[in-house]
């Protein structure tokens, strides 16, 4: 039964990570035209950093099954994209430099939409995995009734 709960824990952690990823992507899309931020300069695209987080369970510690250890998904950081901003010629813009160029955010809306679609599909896959795990748990309980 602990394997079922481990599977649920892993999928639940992935759901949380993907939800945060979708929030970061939404922020990137919302700020795709933001030329002035509190930090100064244009908005910088952000990305979450995921890491495998070993799941410590009594069974794994007792059996010392490190090769069978499951890993949760953990968001360790949200980093800014180091790519430079795009310079766009807009001499009438209030943030234009003396040459008439405006530093625009380094956000590619098409790339962000693909990332959002990928995150959404991954989220759906983890919801499906949770539902399959719940169904397997119910079937295992039905075996005990007969």
Image (tube, grey):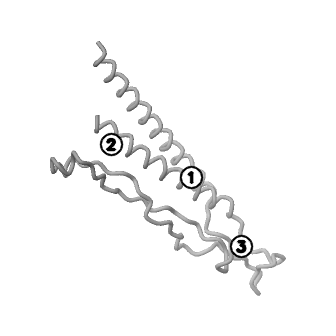
Q: Is residue 85 left or right of residue 136?
A: right
Q: Nearer the viewer, residue 51 or 111?
A: 51
Q: Which of the 4 image quadrants contains residue 84?
A: bottom right
Residue 51 appears left or right of 35: left
Q: Secondary structure at mark 3?
A: loop
Residue 10, percent from left and from top = 37, 46
Q: CA distance from mark 1 to mark 2?
A: 24 Å
Mark found first going from the N terminus, 1 or 3:
1
Q: Residue at x 52, y 74 (%)?
A: 82
Q: Quadrant of residue 95?
A: bottom right
Q: Is residue 39 left or right of residue 102?
A: left
Against 84, is 12 above or below?
above
Q: Nearer the viewer, mark 3 or mark 2?
A: 2
Residue at position x 81%, y 78% in the image:
94
Q: Residues within 10 Å of mark 2 (few under 14, many from 20)?
A: some
Circles 1 and 3, Cβ within 8 Å, touching? The answer is no
Q: Which mark is residue 6?
A: 2
- First in sequence: mark 1 or mark 2? 2
Image quarter hosting the N terminus: top left
The residue singled out by tag 1 in the image is 22
Compared to residue 63, the image places residue 135 above or below, namely: above
Residue nearest the viewer, comparing 115 with 100: 115
Q: Nearer the viewer, mark 1 or mark 2?
A: 2
Report the number of discs.
3
Q: Earlier in the sequence, mark 3 or mark 2?
A: 2
Q: CA distance from mark 3 to mark 2?
A: 45 Å
Callout 3 crowding tier (Cα within 10 Å): few <14, some 14–19, many ≥20: many
Q: Nearer the viewer, residue 117 or 124?
A: 124
Residue at the extreme left: 63
The answer to whether residue 58 is above or below residue 99 is above
Residue that numbered label 3 is attached to: 35
């Amino acid at each position: 039964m602990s394997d079922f709960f481990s599977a649920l824990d892993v999928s639940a952690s992935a759901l949380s990570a993907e939800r945060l990823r979708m929030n970061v992507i939404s922020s990137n899309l919302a700020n795709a035209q933001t030329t002035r931020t509190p930090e100064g300069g244009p908005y910088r695209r952000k990305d979450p950093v995921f890491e495998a987080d070993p799941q410590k369970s009594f069974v794994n510690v007792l059996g010392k099954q490190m090769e069978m250890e499951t890993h949760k998904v953990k968001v360790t950081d949200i980093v800014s994209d180091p790519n430079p901003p795009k310079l766009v010629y807009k001499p009438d813009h209030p943030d234009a430099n003396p040459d008439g160029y405006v530093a625009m955010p380094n956000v590619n809306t098409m790339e962000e939409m693909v990332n959002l679609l990928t995150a959404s599909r991954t989220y759906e896959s983890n919801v499906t995995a949770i539902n399959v795990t719940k169904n397997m748990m119910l079937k295992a309980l039905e075996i005990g009734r007969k």
